[in-house]
Amino acid sequence: MLELQEVCFAIKKEGEEVNLVDKVSIKVPRGHFMAIVGPSGCGKTTLLKTIAGLNAESAGTLLWNGNSLSEGHDFDPSEIGYVPQFSIAYDPLTIDESIEAATRLRVKTRNAGELDARIDRALEETGLAAIADRFVKVLSGGQKRRLGLAMELVSDPKILLCDEVTSGLDPRSEREIVKLLHELSRKEGRIVLSVTHSLAHLELYDSILVLHEGRVAFHGPPDMLTHYFSVKDTEEIYPRLATQPSDRWQSSWMKHREAYYEKIEILRTKLIKQGELRVPELSSGKDGDDKDSAASAIRTPGMLSQFSTLLSRRWRIFFRDRGQVFLQLAILLCFPVLVSLFSDKANVPIRSLSDMRQSDVMLELAEQQNVRQDTMKAGSALSGIIMFQVVLLGLMGSNNSAREIAGERMIYEKEKFGGLRPSAYLASKIAFLSCLVVAQSLWMAIFVNRFSPFDGEFGQHALFLLLCNGAITAICLGISASMKTAEQASLLSIYLVGFQLPLSGAVLALPEKIEIFTRPFISAYWAWSGSVEALATSKNLAVKSVISTSITPQSLCLYLLGLHIAVGLLISWLGAKRHQWE
């Protein structure tokens, strides 16, 4: 049984605490189908999230099978399913692939046969078996709701929470979903709580919970609803609620509570006797005391198993997104070509002074002037082209990860609620992005060196390009993990890359007083400085002759770029762990 005793959830508004859920006390037995209804803003979704543990109750007690959820005990991830309003599946995947991934992330199966059996059962229960190979992006609203339910049913949850799963559906689809939820509540004693704004099909529910301003105005059988509110039609209930303050409705319901609960129990016992409701734990004689719960507990897969599932799914999504594949290929091919178009300017030979002293002073001065011009021309071009490479790789890094977590935040939060480990999720992102970073950086270094070779250590230059791309990718991943929306993450990442060039000092040196504060945060500077140090002596001196920015030793550049990567990954980890469910 699920029981709420004087449960409250409060937020601070203008310095004062406001209860969005106010002293809610209800009992929901096993095998029960309950609707949570009420006007907009009455606290329906807030109550559902409080039951789920997404909102921490500010007062009161929640009990599940006699154990207090408010005192350390919590739902096991397999015990509870939550179907939110938003889509929890990726458009490029099929229904079957989506359910398979959900199963692999939530349930530790013994073999492939058990895995297939769970998938097939979820498909059959939700009526999706006939269209299992259909892509999510072409599904109707009702089919997406069924998919959301199927992805929760893979772990056989004992309590299923549904938030507005019928919203936006046509009347026929709405009735089909409500009937499906009704059928699911009849299996294995499952509790199904459904938040809905609609007052249609109420006869399919075992009880109706009416909220008004966060308080219980009514909780009882659907056939008592119109009588209790003294209305002829259910559509008149919401206007009727507005005629009295919520505390009076709550007080009125408390007077009738026991009578309504007695009727609910009579109807429930009747269903059990008729065989229409299965409640396995009743065989022990105690409602809510499931003796086999420990033996039948579903274990969550290990970190490595979740990691491999996520990485495999990420690559599948990537290759099915033709726009993203085309963009990555275009960037990979075009950016090195852009660098090569300008690199010839850096390969002009630098003339040196003749060993023979000129007898003519004017000729000697002219020779010195020519050498100086060659040096400045080559040095300026080299410095600019190396920075051009670095900034382009910064753009690649931003494109790699700016939307990687923020763009799927709600799906990730839902999967985390179902038992996904943040460590497995972040590790899969790092593995995927590392492949992009290595391919982009090495191809940039190899292509430019092949068609417009610079004199110097190729390996060292390639390493700094790799670290620069990795640093920007890691930092943008941290931004993505910290932002609420993909748009916010993209905008901030663009600003980050945009400031790399002016604050690096490679083009125009900043005042020393400013440079001291900005330089530690500019990945482009450390990659540029390290690459300059990797040049042959003559080219290195040529660059130093035309810049006023100091060049840092390679060892320090390596250390700082590595630190940037570490900081980016730390921010990513903190953002991935943080609860950001809206």
Image (cartoon, helix red, strand yellow):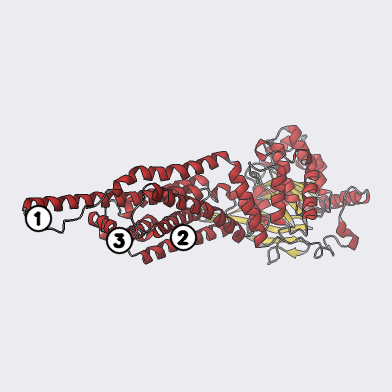
As drawn, the residue found furthest toward the right would be 274
Q: Nearer the viewer, residue 55 or 464?
A: 464
Determine the secondary structure under disc 1.
loop
- How many residues crowd around disc 2 within 10 Å: few (fewer than 14), some, or many (20 or more)? many
Determine the secondary structure under disc 3.
loop
Q: Hey, which quadrant is residue 241 in on the image?
A: top right
Q: Nearer the viewer, residue 69 or 545?
A: 545
Q: CA distance from mark 3 to mark 1?
A: 35 Å
In the picture of the structure, the residue carrying the numbered disc 3 is: 551
Name the amino acid, label 1: Gln
Horizontally, residue 156 falls left or right of residue 405, namely: right
In the picture of the structure, the residue carrying the numbered disc 1 is: 358
- For discs 3 and 1, the disc positioned in front in the rendered view: 1
Q: Provide residue 366's location: percent of width, then percent of height.
A: 12, 50
Count the marks: how many? 3
Dots 3 and 1: beta carbons under 8 Å? no
**First in sequence: mark 2 vs mark 1:** 1
Q: Provide residue 475's location: percent of width, then percent of height.
A: 46, 56
Q: Provide residue 174's location: percent of width, then percent of height.
A: 74, 36
- For the question of whether residue 24 can be seen, the reply is no
Is 143 placed above or below 561 here?
Answer: above
Name the amino acid, label 3: Ile
As drawn, the residue found furthest toward the front would be 356
Name the amino acid, label 2: Ile
Q: CA distance from mark 2 to mark 1?
A: 54 Å
Is 553 placed above or below 262 here?
Answer: below
Q: Hey, which quadrant is residue 203 in on the image?
A: top right
Is 31 placed above or below 65 here?
Answer: above
Badge number at residue 565: 2
Horizontally, residue 304 falls left or right of residue 336, namely: right
